[in-house]
Image (cartoon, rainbow, N blue to C red):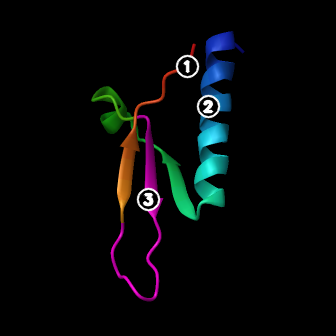
Amino acid sequence: MFITTQKEEFSYAYISAVASVAGYSFQIAPRLLDLVGVDVTITGLASFIFVTFSKIYLLVQFF
């Protein structure tokens, strides 16, 4: 496995861990969103008081 692929996977794992601890859902973006610069989608789960979802799109950079 290339080192750049390893860095990318570790970045996704870290973001997934942080999002899940904060109570959010993590999903790697599909190819169509990846083509426009979106790598990850983080979605807030609905609570019983507020029935709204928040969604964050991220571009992951690694060095």
Q: Alpha carbon of mark 1 to alpha carbon of mark 3: how far?
A: 22 Å
* Residue 49 is one of the magenta-drawn residues: yes
In this view, which residue lies farthest toward the right? 1
Task: Tell me the element at label 1.
Answer: loop
Q: Position of residue 42 (x, y in %)?
A: 46, 52
Query: Split into 4 quadrants, where in the image is the C terminus?
Result: top right
- Which dot marks residue 62? 1
Query: Split into 4 quadrants, where in the image is the N terminus?
Result: top right
Q: Alpha carbon of mark 2 to alpha carbon of mark 3: how far?
A: 18 Å
Which of marks 3 and 1 precedes in the sequence?
3
- Which dot marks residue 31? none
Bin the neighbour count of mark 2 within 10 Å (Cα to Cα): few under 14, some 14-19, many 20 and up: some
Residue labelled with disc 2? 11
Q: Residue at x 62, y 31 (%)?
A: 11
In this view, which residue lies farthest toward the left? 36
**Main secondary structure type of the part rendered in magenta:** loop
33 left or right of 6? left
Residue labelled with disc 3? 43
Q: Amino acid at mark 3?
A: Thr
Q: Residue at x 66, y 59 (%)?
A: 21
Task: Tell me the element at label 3.
Answer: strand
Q: Alpha carbon of mark 1 to alpha carbon of mark 2: how far?
A: 7 Å
Q: Position of residue 14 (x, y in %)?
A: 66, 39
* Residue 46 placement: quadrant: bottom left
Residues marked 1 and 3 touching at CB (< 8 Å): no
Residues marked 1 and 2 touching at CB (< 8 Å): yes
Q: Which residues are magenta?
A: 39-53
In this picture, is 63 found above or below 39?
Answer: above
